[in-house]
Image: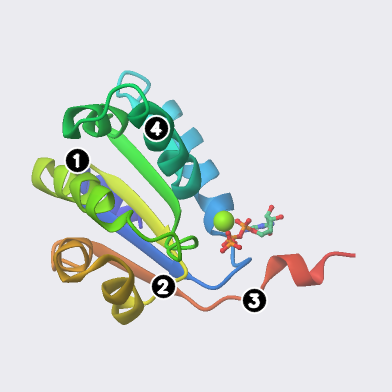
Amino acid sequence: MHDWYKKGKDFLVYIGNAGCGKTWFCQAMFTFMRMSHPSLSRRYWNEIDLFDRIRSDAATYYSRQAIHSLVDDHFLILDDVGSNYMMKGNEETFFHIIDKRYSSRLPTIVTTNLDKEDFKIAYGERTASRVFSDENIILIVKGHDFRQNKK
Ligand SMILES: Nc1ncnc2c1ncn2[C@@H]1O[C@H](COP(=O)(O)OP(=O)(O)OP(=O)(O)O)[C@@H](O)[C@H]1O
Ligand SMILES: [Mg+2]
């Protein structure tokens, strides 16, 4: 994680069970990015919100360019990827997003409940191949569910 931030490019893929702290981590990283690199733009998307936004934009103006403009910040955080993958028809859009981030090599965090195989099933081989590319850092966490320990 530290290595990834120091490197300043490519993907950090955080795979973890529900409640292990992925969203918590994203929020902490977002704040950290703002403090350590205030001049670099950053954006945080929950996957569901991102697709909602793309759909609402699509009503008026839809293009690959429009999608890219939602994900062209220096730092990008995509939280909860695949949690709504039952919603068919997003694979193509998601591919454009990942391809854009992958080819620019800008620092991108992806969090998901899906392992590599399920990710491939959900989003297709071309997307998975970029997300799990060798230069990326893959963090697999099998932590306890913080939500179950609350009093
Ligand atoms: N390191 C931590 N220290 C204290 N509390 C934490 C920590 N990480 C997470 N939590 C708390 O645990 C709960 C679950 O964490 P979080 O929402 O980040 O999980 P998640 O991995 O995003 O789960 P999901 O896959 O369901 O989205 C939250 O209430 C969060 O505030
Ligand atoms: Mg979450």
Whichever of labels 3 and 4 marks the residue nearer the N terminus, that label is 4
How far across and how far down the image is residue 122, in percent?
33, 70
* Crowd band around label 1 with a 10 angstrom C-alpha radius: few (<14), some (14–19), many (20+): some
Quarter of the image where one finds residue 110: bottom left
Secondary element at tag 1? loop
10 Å neighbourhood of mark 2: few (<14), some, or many (≥20)?
some
Using the numbered discs, state the Cα–Cα distance from disc 4 to disc 2 in whole angstroms. 22 Å
Where, by quadrant of the figure, is residue 111 drawn? Answer: bottom left
- Tag 1 or tag 2, which sits nearer the N-term? 1
SS for callout 2: loop
At x 14% / y 65%, what residue is drawn?
Answer: 126
Mark sitting earlier along the chain (1/4): 4
Disc 3 or 2, which lies upstream in sequence?
A: 2
Given residues 90 and 141, the one toward you in this image is 90
Q: What is the residue that sits farthest to the left in this orientation? A: 103
- Tell me which amino acid carries mark 2: Leu
**SS for callout 4:** strand
Residue type marked 1? Leu
List the residue tagged with mark 3. Answer: 144
Q: CA distance from mark 3 to mark 4?
A: 28 Å
Q: Residue furthest front?
A: 59
Ligand 2 closer than 8 Å to the CB at disc 1?
no
Report whether 18 appears left or right of 2.
Answer: right
Q: Which residue is mark 2?
A: 114
Residue 57, placed above or below residue 135: above
**Residue 43, disc:** 4
Q: Given the image, on which type of amino acid does mark 3 rest?
A: His
Q: Position of residue 28 (x, y in %)?
A: 53, 43
Foreground mark, 2 or 1, reads 2
